[in-house]
Amino acid sequence: MPLYLFNTLGRELQEFKPLEPGKVGFYGCGPTVYNYAHIGNLRAYVTHDILVRSLRRLGYQVTHVMNLTDVGHLSGDSDTGEDKMVKSAEERGKSVLEIASYYTDAFFKDTERLNIIRPTVVCKATEHISDMIALIERIEQRGYTYRAGGNLYFDITKFPTYGELARLKLEDLKAGARIDVDENKRNPHDFALWFTKSKFENQALTWDSPWGRGYPGWHIECSAMSMKYLGEQFDIHAGGIDHIPIHHTNEIAQSEAATGKKWVNYWVHNEFLVLDKGKMSKSSGNFLTLQSLIDAGYDPLDYRYFLLGGHYRSQLQFSFEALDSARNSRKALVDRLFFLADKCSDLPEAWKEGEFISEKAKSYQEAFNRAIAEDLSTPRALAELWGLIRDTELEPAEALRIAFDMDLVLGLGLRELLQAPRAEQQLDSETVKEIEALITERSAAKKAKNYQRADEIRNMLKERGILLEDTPQGTTWRLIL
Ligand code: AMP
Ligand code: ZN
Protein backbone atom coordinates (compact mmCIF):
# COMPACT_ATOMS: atom_id res chain seq x y z
CA MET A 1 0.00 0.00 0.00
CA PRO A 2 1.56 3.35 -1.00
CA LEU A 3 2.09 5.94 1.69
CA TYR A 4 0.75 9.42 1.09
CA LEU A 5 2.26 12.32 2.97
CA PHE A 6 1.22 15.94 3.02
CA ASN A 7 4.25 17.69 1.60
CA THR A 8 4.58 21.28 2.80
CA LEU A 9 6.56 21.83 -0.38
CA GLY A 10 3.62 21.95 -2.75
CA ARG A 11 0.98 21.88 0.00
CA GLU A 12 -0.62 18.62 -1.15
CA LEU A 13 -0.82 14.93 -0.40
CA GLN A 14 1.86 13.15 -2.39
CA GLU A 15 2.69 9.51 -2.81
CA PHE A 16 5.94 8.81 -1.03
CA LYS A 17 8.64 7.57 -3.38
CA PRO A 18 12.09 7.12 -1.89
CA LEU A 19 15.24 8.14 -3.71
CA GLU A 20 16.58 4.65 -3.27
CA PRO A 21 14.17 1.69 -3.34
CA GLY A 22 13.49 0.25 0.10
CA LYS A 23 15.45 2.92 1.95
CA VAL A 24 14.50 6.19 3.60
CA GLY A 25 16.73 9.01 4.76
CA PHE A 26 14.89 11.06 7.37
CA TYR A 27 16.04 14.10 9.30
CA GLY A 28 14.02 15.62 12.12
CA CYS A 29 15.16 18.81 13.81
CA GLY A 30 16.05 18.01 17.39
CA PRO A 31 15.90 20.05 20.58
CA THR A 32 17.92 23.01 21.70
CA VAL A 33 19.21 21.57 24.93
CA TYR A 34 19.00 24.62 27.18
CA ASN A 35 15.94 23.56 29.12
CA TYR A 36 13.52 20.66 29.50
CA ALA A 37 11.45 19.81 26.46
CA HIS A 38 7.88 20.99 26.98
CA ILE A 39 4.99 18.76 26.04
CA GLY A 40 4.52 20.75 22.81
CA ASN A 41 8.07 19.93 21.73
CA LEU A 42 7.36 16.31 22.57
CA ARG A 43 4.45 16.37 20.14
CA ALA A 44 7.00 17.00 17.38
CA TYR A 45 9.07 13.97 18.42
CA VAL A 46 6.05 11.70 18.74
CA THR A 47 5.10 12.76 15.20
CA HIS A 48 8.59 11.84 13.95
CA ASP A 49 8.29 8.55 15.78
CA ILE A 50 4.95 7.70 14.16
CA LEU A 51 6.43 8.50 10.76
CA VAL A 52 9.50 6.32 11.34
CA ARG A 53 7.46 3.45 12.77
CA SER A 54 5.02 3.61 9.85
CA LEU A 55 7.82 3.56 7.29
CA ARG A 56 9.50 0.63 9.01
CA ARG A 57 6.27 -1.31 9.22
CA LEU A 58 5.89 -0.75 5.47
CA GLY A 59 9.25 -2.45 5.08
CA TYR A 60 11.56 0.52 4.55
CA GLN A 61 14.98 0.62 6.08
CA VAL A 62 14.93 4.03 7.72
CA THR A 63 17.97 6.04 8.75
CA HIS A 64 16.64 8.60 11.20
CA VAL A 65 18.98 11.47 12.04
CA MET A 66 18.36 13.99 14.79
CA ASN A 67 20.54 16.90 15.83
CA LEU A 68 21.05 18.34 19.27
CA THR A 69 21.52 22.10 19.19
CA ASP A 70 24.09 23.05 21.76
CA VAL A 71 25.41 26.21 20.14
CA GLY A 72 24.25 29.12 18.03
CA HIS A 73 20.49 29.20 18.62
CA LEU A 74 19.43 32.69 19.55
CA SER A 75 16.11 33.40 21.21
CA GLY A 76 14.79 34.79 17.91
CA ASP A 77 15.00 32.35 15.01
CA SER A 78 16.21 35.18 12.75
CA ASP A 79 19.46 35.93 14.57
CA THR A 80 17.88 38.19 17.16
CA GLY A 81 18.01 38.07 20.93
CA GLU A 82 20.33 36.24 23.22
CA ASP A 83 22.09 32.91 22.85
CA LYS A 84 19.75 30.39 24.47
CA MET A 85 22.50 28.12 25.75
CA VAL A 86 24.65 30.89 27.18
CA LYS A 87 21.71 32.54 28.90
CA SER A 88 20.58 29.30 30.48
CA ALA A 89 24.12 28.46 31.64
CA GLU A 90 24.49 31.89 33.23
CA GLU A 91 21.16 31.71 34.99
CA ARG A 92 22.00 28.32 36.43
CA GLY A 93 25.65 29.05 37.22
CA LYS A 94 26.89 26.17 35.04
CA SER A 95 28.97 25.84 31.92
CA VAL A 96 27.27 25.59 28.55
CA LEU A 97 28.43 22.01 28.13
CA GLU A 98 27.13 21.03 31.55
CA ILE A 99 23.77 22.50 30.66
CA ALA A 100 23.76 20.71 27.31
CA SER A 101 24.63 17.39 28.88
CA TYR A 102 22.01 17.70 31.64
CA TYR A 103 19.14 18.62 29.31
CA THR A 104 20.17 16.07 26.69
CA ASP A 105 19.84 13.34 29.29
CA ALA A 106 16.50 14.76 30.41
CA PHE A 107 15.32 14.83 26.81
CA PHE A 108 16.11 11.18 26.15
CA LYS A 109 14.57 10.18 29.43
CA ASP A 110 11.35 11.82 28.26
CA THR A 111 11.44 10.31 24.79
CA GLU A 112 12.09 6.87 26.22
CA ARG A 113 9.17 7.20 28.59
CA LEU A 114 7.01 8.07 25.59
CA ASN A 115 8.16 4.96 23.72
CA ILE A 116 9.85 7.07 21.09
CA ILE A 117 12.41 4.97 19.27
CA ARG A 118 15.85 6.50 19.52
CA PRO A 119 17.01 7.91 16.18
CA THR A 120 19.62 5.95 14.24
CA VAL A 121 22.03 8.89 14.51
CA VAL A 122 21.97 11.60 17.17
CA CYS A 123 24.47 14.35 16.44
CA LYS A 124 25.59 17.35 18.43
CA ALA A 125 26.20 20.68 16.75
CA THR A 126 29.39 21.33 18.74
CA GLU A 127 30.89 18.09 17.42
CA HIS A 128 30.31 19.04 13.78
CA ILE A 129 31.79 22.51 13.52
CA SER A 130 34.30 21.47 10.85
CA ASP A 131 31.47 20.03 8.70
CA MET A 132 29.63 23.32 9.04
CA ILE A 133 32.72 25.32 8.11
CA ALA A 134 33.29 23.13 5.03
CA LEU A 135 29.68 23.62 3.94
CA ILE A 136 29.82 27.38 4.48
CA GLU A 137 32.98 27.48 2.36
CA ARG A 138 31.11 25.82 -0.49
CA ILE A 139 28.28 28.32 -0.19
CA GLU A 140 30.81 31.13 -0.19
CA GLN A 141 32.67 29.78 -3.21
CA ARG A 142 29.43 29.70 -5.16
CA GLY A 143 28.88 33.39 -4.45
CA TYR A 144 25.94 33.40 -2.07
CA THR A 145 27.49 35.20 0.85
CA TYR A 146 28.81 38.55 2.01
CA ARG A 147 30.75 39.72 5.00
CA ALA A 148 29.50 42.55 7.14
CA GLY A 149 30.38 43.71 10.61
CA GLY A 150 32.73 40.75 10.96
CA ASN A 151 30.00 38.16 10.33
CA LEU A 152 29.28 36.09 7.24
CA TYR A 153 25.73 36.30 5.87
CA PHE A 154 23.68 34.44 3.29
CA ASP A 155 22.33 36.80 0.65
CA ILE A 156 18.79 35.64 -0.09
CA THR A 157 18.54 37.69 -3.29
CA LYS A 158 21.12 35.37 -4.88
CA PHE A 159 18.79 32.41 -4.39
CA PRO A 160 15.76 33.04 -6.62
CA THR A 161 13.51 30.37 -5.11
CA TYR A 162 14.10 31.61 -1.57
CA GLY A 163 10.95 31.18 0.51
CA GLU A 164 9.26 28.61 -1.74
CA LEU A 165 8.54 26.30 1.19
CA ALA A 166 6.79 29.04 3.12
CA ARG A 167 5.32 30.61 -0.01
CA LEU A 168 7.15 33.83 0.72
CA LYS A 169 7.62 36.16 -2.23
CA LEU A 170 11.10 37.49 -2.74
CA GLU A 171 9.69 40.80 -3.98
CA ASP A 172 7.70 41.26 -0.78
CA LEU A 173 10.67 40.25 1.29
CA LYS A 174 12.87 42.88 -0.29
CA ALA A 175 10.40 45.61 0.50
CA GLY A 176 9.95 43.66 3.72
CA ALA A 177 8.71 44.60 7.09
CA ARG A 178 11.60 45.04 9.48
CA ILE A 179 11.84 41.78 11.26
CA ASP A 180 15.36 42.23 12.40
CA VAL A 181 17.59 44.75 14.05
CA ASP A 182 20.92 43.51 12.70
CA GLU A 183 22.21 46.51 10.72
CA ASN A 184 24.81 44.39 8.97
CA LYS A 185 22.17 42.67 6.91
CA ARG A 186 21.43 43.95 3.43
CA ASN A 187 18.01 42.39 3.56
CA PRO A 188 16.27 41.70 6.85
CA HIS A 189 15.72 38.08 5.77
CA ASP A 190 19.41 37.45 5.13
CA PHE A 191 20.81 35.22 7.82
CA ALA A 192 24.10 34.59 9.54
CA LEU A 193 26.15 31.58 8.54
CA TRP A 194 29.00 32.48 10.85
CA PHE A 195 29.31 35.01 13.65
CA THR A 196 32.68 36.39 14.60
CA LYS A 197 31.65 39.62 16.20
CA SER A 198 29.68 38.03 18.90
CA LYS A 199 26.87 40.14 20.19
CA PHE A 200 27.70 38.68 23.56
CA GLU A 201 30.92 39.42 25.33
CA ASN A 202 30.64 36.17 27.20
CA GLN A 203 30.11 33.83 24.24
CA ALA A 204 31.20 30.57 25.76
CA LEU A 205 32.19 28.48 22.78
CA THR A 206 34.12 29.76 19.78
CA TRP A 207 36.10 28.13 17.00
CA ASP A 208 38.66 29.24 14.42
CA SER A 209 37.32 29.59 10.90
CA PRO A 210 38.26 31.22 7.56
CA TRP A 211 36.12 34.19 8.70
CA GLY A 212 37.77 34.53 12.08
CA ARG A 213 37.18 33.03 15.47
CA GLY A 214 33.51 32.67 16.17
CA TYR A 215 30.56 30.31 16.05
CA PRO A 216 28.01 29.11 13.49
CA GLY A 217 24.53 30.42 12.88
CA TRP A 218 21.76 28.09 13.96
CA HIS A 219 20.44 26.94 10.58
CA ILE A 220 23.72 25.68 9.13
CA GLU A 221 24.02 22.84 11.61
CA CYS A 222 20.97 21.02 10.23
CA SER A 223 22.21 21.28 6.64
CA ALA A 224 25.73 20.14 7.50
CA MET A 225 24.76 17.25 9.75
CA SER A 226 21.90 15.92 7.62
CA MET A 227 24.17 15.88 4.56
CA LYS A 228 26.93 14.20 6.48
CA TYR A 229 24.76 11.29 7.56
CA LEU A 230 22.17 11.11 4.78
CA GLY A 231 23.95 12.46 1.71
CA GLU A 232 23.43 15.66 -0.25
CA GLN A 233 19.92 14.64 -1.19
CA PHE A 234 17.54 12.75 1.03
CA ASP A 235 13.88 11.87 1.38
CA ILE A 236 12.11 13.46 4.34
CA HIS A 237 12.72 16.38 6.68
CA ALA A 238 10.41 17.19 9.58
CA GLY A 239 9.82 19.70 12.33
CA GLY A 240 7.11 21.89 13.83
CA ILE A 241 5.23 24.39 11.66
CA ASP A 242 7.05 27.28 13.33
CA HIS A 243 10.12 26.21 11.40
CA ILE A 244 8.59 26.68 7.95
CA PRO A 245 9.17 30.43 7.40
CA ILE A 246 12.67 30.82 8.80
CA HIS A 247 14.61 27.78 9.90
CA HIS A 248 13.61 25.35 7.16
CA THR A 249 13.44 28.08 4.55
CA ASN A 250 17.02 29.01 5.35
CA GLU A 251 18.15 25.40 5.54
CA ILE A 252 16.87 24.83 1.99
CA ALA A 253 18.48 28.01 0.64
CA GLN A 254 21.93 27.30 2.03
CA SER A 255 21.89 23.56 1.23
CA GLU A 256 20.80 24.00 -2.36
CA ALA A 257 23.15 26.97 -2.77
CA ALA A 258 26.02 24.71 -1.71
CA THR A 259 25.19 21.71 -3.89
CA GLY A 260 23.23 23.21 -6.78
CA LYS A 261 20.77 20.31 -6.37
CA LYS A 262 17.36 19.79 -4.84
CA TRP A 263 17.99 18.89 -1.22
CA VAL A 264 14.91 17.25 0.33
CA ASN A 265 11.87 15.77 -1.41
CA TYR A 266 9.23 15.70 1.34
CA TRP A 267 8.68 18.20 4.15
CA VAL A 268 6.49 17.07 7.04
CA HIS A 269 5.39 19.65 9.61
CA ASN A 270 3.41 19.06 12.75
CA GLU A 271 0.92 21.62 14.03
CA PHE A 272 1.26 23.02 17.51
CA LEU A 273 0.02 21.83 20.82
CA VAL A 274 -1.54 24.79 22.58
CA LEU A 275 -2.60 25.44 26.13
CA ASP A 276 -5.91 27.03 27.02
CA LYS A 277 -3.79 30.02 28.03
CA GLY A 278 -2.19 30.23 24.59
CA LYS A 279 1.23 29.50 23.27
CA MET A 280 3.60 27.32 25.20
CA SER A 281 7.16 28.50 25.09
CA LYS A 282 10.34 27.41 26.76
CA SER A 283 11.73 30.90 27.02
CA SER A 284 8.66 32.37 28.74
CA GLY A 285 8.73 29.62 31.34
CA ASN A 286 5.04 29.01 30.63
CA PHE A 287 5.24 25.37 29.86
CA LEU A 288 4.42 21.89 31.04
CA THR A 289 6.97 19.12 31.04
CA LEU A 290 6.36 15.40 30.84
CA GLN A 291 7.65 15.14 34.39
CA SER A 292 4.99 17.58 35.58
CA LEU A 293 2.33 15.28 34.07
CA ILE A 294 3.92 12.30 35.80
CA ASP A 295 3.97 14.22 39.08
CA ALA A 296 0.28 14.88 38.60
CA GLY A 297 -0.22 11.12 38.46
CA TYR A 298 -0.34 10.44 34.73
CA ASP A 299 1.52 7.75 32.88
CA PRO A 300 3.68 9.13 30.03
CA LEU A 301 1.78 6.83 27.70
CA ASP A 302 -1.46 8.59 28.63
CA TYR A 303 0.10 11.63 27.01
CA ARG A 304 1.17 9.63 23.96
CA TYR A 305 -2.38 8.28 23.68
CA PHE A 306 -3.72 11.83 23.95
CA LEU A 307 -1.45 12.92 21.08
CA LEU A 308 -2.49 10.00 18.89
CA GLY A 309 -6.08 11.16 19.24
CA GLY A 310 -5.28 14.23 17.12
CA HIS A 311 -3.98 14.31 13.58
CA TYR A 312 -0.46 15.70 13.50
CA ARG A 313 -1.52 18.44 11.10
CA SER A 314 -4.30 19.74 13.35
CA GLN A 315 -3.72 22.07 16.21
CA LEU A 316 -4.28 20.25 19.46
CA GLN A 317 -5.49 21.94 22.60
CA PHE A 318 -4.07 20.52 25.78
CA SER A 319 -6.17 20.37 28.92
CA PHE A 320 -6.13 18.10 31.93
CA GLU A 321 -9.73 17.09 31.16
CA ALA A 322 -8.61 15.87 27.75
CA LEU A 323 -5.65 14.09 29.32
CA ASP A 324 -8.00 12.44 31.85
CA SER A 325 -10.10 11.16 29.05
CA ALA A 326 -7.01 9.80 27.25
CA ARG A 327 -5.97 8.10 30.47
CA ASN A 328 -9.39 6.49 30.86
CA SER A 329 -9.39 5.30 27.26
CA ARG A 330 -5.91 3.86 27.52
CA LYS A 331 -6.84 2.08 30.72
CA ALA A 332 -9.99 0.67 29.07
CA LEU A 333 -7.86 -0.42 26.12
CA VAL A 334 -5.38 -2.26 28.29
CA ASP A 335 -8.17 -3.82 30.38
CA ARG A 336 -9.85 -5.05 27.22
CA LEU A 337 -6.59 -6.58 26.03
CA PHE A 338 -6.18 -8.37 29.35
CA PHE A 339 -9.74 -9.61 28.99
CA LEU A 340 -8.94 -10.98 25.53
CA ALA A 341 -5.69 -12.48 26.77
CA ASP A 342 -7.57 -14.27 29.56
CA LYS A 343 -9.75 -15.87 26.90
CA CYS A 344 -6.84 -17.30 25.01
CA SER A 345 -6.22 -20.84 26.06
CA ASP A 346 -2.56 -20.50 25.28
CA LEU A 347 -1.57 -16.86 25.47
CA PRO A 348 1.68 -17.02 23.51
CA GLU A 349 -0.35 -18.26 20.53
CA ALA A 350 -1.76 -14.77 20.31
CA TRP A 351 1.45 -13.46 18.92
CA LYS A 352 2.47 -16.33 16.71
CA GLU A 353 3.03 -15.36 13.09
CA GLY A 354 1.48 -16.92 10.03
CA GLU A 355 -1.59 -18.57 11.52
CA PHE A 356 -5.09 -18.36 10.17
CA ILE A 357 -6.69 -14.96 10.51
CA SER A 358 -10.30 -14.38 9.54
CA GLU A 359 -11.31 -12.01 6.76
CA LYS A 360 -13.10 -9.85 9.30
CA ALA A 361 -10.02 -9.44 11.44
CA LYS A 362 -7.97 -8.65 8.36
CA SER A 363 -10.44 -5.98 7.35
CA TYR A 364 -9.62 -4.03 10.54
CA GLN A 365 -5.95 -4.38 9.80
CA GLU A 366 -6.45 -3.13 6.26
CA ALA A 367 -8.53 -0.18 7.41
CA PHE A 368 -5.81 0.62 9.91
CA ASN A 369 -3.20 0.45 7.16
CA ARG A 370 -5.26 2.78 4.98
CA ALA A 371 -5.57 5.27 7.84
CA ILE A 372 -1.82 5.35 8.32
CA ALA A 373 -1.14 5.40 4.58
CA GLU A 374 -3.32 8.50 4.28
CA ASP A 375 -0.96 10.95 5.89
CA LEU A 376 -0.55 9.10 9.20
CA SER A 377 -4.10 9.43 10.47
CA THR A 378 -3.61 8.19 14.00
CA PRO A 379 -7.16 9.11 15.15
CA ARG A 380 -8.61 6.80 12.49
CA ALA A 381 -5.98 4.19 13.23
CA LEU A 382 -6.93 4.20 16.92
CA ALA A 383 -10.59 3.83 15.99
CA GLU A 384 -9.72 0.71 13.99
CA LEU A 385 -7.83 -0.72 16.94
CA TRP A 386 -10.89 -0.16 19.12
CA GLY A 387 -13.20 -1.70 16.52
CA LEU A 388 -10.95 -4.75 16.40
CA ILE A 389 -10.72 -5.42 20.10
CA ARG A 390 -14.42 -4.80 20.72
CA ASP A 391 -15.57 -7.10 17.94
CA THR A 392 -16.95 -10.13 19.70
CA GLU A 393 -17.06 -12.17 16.49
CA LEU A 394 -13.30 -12.35 16.37
CA GLU A 395 -11.15 -14.95 18.03
CA PRO A 396 -9.37 -13.30 20.96
CA ALA A 397 -6.02 -14.59 19.74
CA GLU A 398 -6.38 -13.08 16.28
CA ALA A 399 -7.60 -9.78 17.70
CA LEU A 400 -4.58 -9.66 19.97
CA ARG A 401 -2.21 -10.54 17.21
CA ILE A 402 -3.50 -7.73 15.01
CA ALA A 403 -3.57 -5.30 17.92
CA PHE A 404 0.13 -5.93 18.48
CA ASP A 405 0.81 -5.44 14.81
CA MET A 406 -1.05 -2.10 14.88
CA ASP A 407 0.96 -1.12 17.91
CA LEU A 408 4.15 -1.30 15.87
CA VAL A 409 2.94 2.07 14.59
CA LEU A 410 1.07 3.42 17.61
CA GLY A 411 3.86 2.63 20.04
CA LEU A 412 1.66 2.19 23.11
CA GLY A 413 3.75 -0.71 24.33
CA LEU A 414 0.73 -3.06 24.34
CA ARG A 415 2.63 -6.29 23.96
CA GLU A 416 4.99 -5.36 26.78
CA LEU A 417 2.10 -4.38 29.03
CA LEU A 418 0.44 -7.71 28.48
CA GLN A 419 3.54 -9.79 28.78
CA ALA A 420 4.58 -8.15 32.01
CA PRO A 421 2.68 -9.43 35.01
CA ARG A 422 -0.10 -7.05 35.96
CA ALA A 423 1.49 -4.38 38.10
CA GLU A 424 -0.66 -5.12 41.13
CA GLN A 425 0.38 -8.76 41.02
CA GLN A 426 4.00 -7.77 41.45
CA LEU A 427 3.42 -6.68 45.03
CA ASP A 428 3.45 -9.18 47.84
CA SER A 429 0.36 -9.48 50.01
CA GLU A 430 2.02 -7.76 53.00
CA THR A 431 2.64 -4.64 50.92
CA VAL A 432 -0.90 -4.68 49.60
CA LYS A 433 -2.21 -4.90 53.18
CA GLU A 434 0.02 -2.00 54.18
CA ILE A 435 -1.22 0.13 51.29
CA GLU A 436 -4.81 -0.60 52.16
CA ALA A 437 -4.24 0.28 55.81
CA LEU A 438 -2.75 3.60 54.77
CA ILE A 439 -5.73 4.29 52.54
CA THR A 440 -8.06 3.65 55.45
CA GLU A 441 -5.99 5.93 57.64
CA ARG A 442 -6.06 8.62 54.95
CA SER A 443 -9.85 8.42 54.61
CA ALA A 444 -10.18 8.82 58.38
CA ALA A 445 -7.78 11.76 58.35
CA LYS A 446 -9.81 13.42 55.61
CA LYS A 447 -13.01 12.91 57.54
CA ALA A 448 -11.37 14.52 60.56
CA LYS A 449 -10.28 17.39 58.28
CA ASN A 450 -6.65 16.52 58.92
CA TYR A 451 -5.70 17.25 55.31
CA GLN A 452 -2.04 17.52 56.14
CA ARG A 453 -1.87 13.86 57.18
CA ALA A 454 -4.04 12.86 54.23
CA ASP A 455 -1.66 14.58 51.81
CA GLU A 456 1.32 13.14 53.61
CA ILE A 457 0.02 9.62 53.05
CA ARG A 458 -0.76 10.31 49.39
CA ASN A 459 2.73 11.71 48.80
CA MET A 460 4.45 8.96 50.72
CA LEU A 461 2.74 6.35 48.55
CA LYS A 462 3.45 8.32 45.40
CA GLU A 463 7.13 8.30 46.20
CA ARG A 464 6.89 4.52 46.34
CA GLY A 465 5.27 4.51 42.88
CA ILE A 466 1.72 3.99 44.15
CA LEU A 467 -0.96 6.31 42.94
CA LEU A 468 -4.23 6.93 44.77
CA GLU A 469 -7.38 7.79 42.89
CA ASP A 470 -10.44 9.13 44.70
CA THR A 471 -13.60 7.90 43.05
CA PRO A 472 -17.26 8.16 44.16
CA GLN A 473 -16.96 4.51 45.22
CA GLY A 474 -13.96 5.19 47.42
CA THR A 475 -10.22 5.39 47.01
CA THR A 476 -8.50 3.00 44.64
CA TRP A 477 -4.81 2.57 44.00
CA ARG A 478 -2.55 1.53 41.19
CA LEU A 479 1.12 1.37 40.46
CA ILE A 480 2.58 4.15 38.37
CA LEU A 481 3.78 2.21 35.35
P1 AMP B 1 13.04 23.71 19.89
O1 AMP B 1 13.71 22.88 20.94
O2 AMP B 1 12.45 24.98 20.38
O3 AMP B 1 13.91 23.90 18.67
O4 AMP B 1 11.76 22.87 19.39
C1 AMP B 1 11.80 21.51 19.15
C2 AMP B 1 10.67 21.06 18.22
O5 AMP B 1 9.40 21.29 18.82
C3 AMP B 1 10.63 21.81 16.89
O6 AMP B 1 10.34 20.87 15.86
C4 AMP B 1 9.49 22.78 17.07
O7 AMP B 1 8.94 23.13 15.82
C5 AMP B 1 8.54 21.97 17.90
N1 AMP B 1 7.59 22.75 18.71
C6 AMP B 1 7.85 23.83 19.47
N2 AMP B 1 6.75 24.21 20.15
C7 AMP B 1 5.77 23.34 19.83
C8 AMP B 1 4.38 23.18 20.21
N3 AMP B 1 3.80 23.99 21.10
N4 AMP B 1 3.68 22.17 19.67
C9 AMP B 1 4.26 21.32 18.79
N5 AMP B 1 5.54 21.40 18.38
C10 AMP B 1 6.30 22.40 18.90
ZN1 ZN C 1 16.81 22.13 11.95
Image (cartoon, helix red, strand yellow):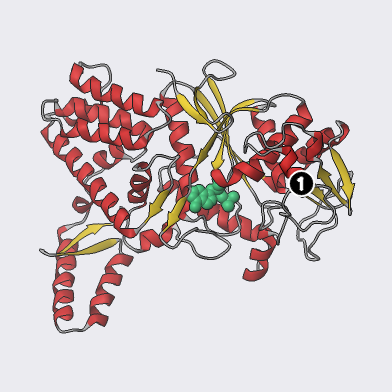
Compared across the picture, whether 187 is left or right of 360 comes to right
Callout 1: CB less than 8 Å from ligand 2: no
Quick check: can you spot residue 51? yes
The residue depicted at 26 percent of the width and 62 percent of the height is 467
The residue depicted at 30 percent of the width and 71 percent of the height is 459
Query: Judging from the image, what secondary structure is the residue with disc 1 in?
Result: helix
Q: What crowding class fits label 1: few (fewer than 14 Cα within 10 Å), some (14-19), or many (20 or more)?
A: few
Rendered view: 380 above or below 24: below
Q: Position of residue 356 (x, y in %)?
A: 20, 16
The residue depicted at 45 percent of the width and 24 percent of the height is 4
Rendered view: 134 above or below 233: below
Q: Position of residue 77 (x, y in %)?
A: 67, 52
Rendered view: 98 above or below 137: below
Image quadrant where residue 290 sits: bottom left
Rendered view: 231 above or below 307: above
Q: Position of residue 385 (x, y in %)?
A: 26, 33
Callout count: 1
Quadrant of the drawing holding the N terminus? top left
Compared across the picture, whether 310 is left or right of 34 comes to left
Residue placed most toward the observer, 440 or 296: 296
Residue placed most toward the observer, 343 or 203: 203
Residue placed most toward the observer, 347 or 305: 305
Residue placed most toward the observer, 245 or 237: 245
Give the residue type that dot 1 points to: Ala
Image quadrant where residue 369 sits: top left
The residue depicted at 70 percent of the width and 51 percent of the height is 78
Q: Position of residue 313 (x, y in %)?
A: 45, 39
Name the residue tied to disc 1.
175
Quick check: can you spot residue 109? no
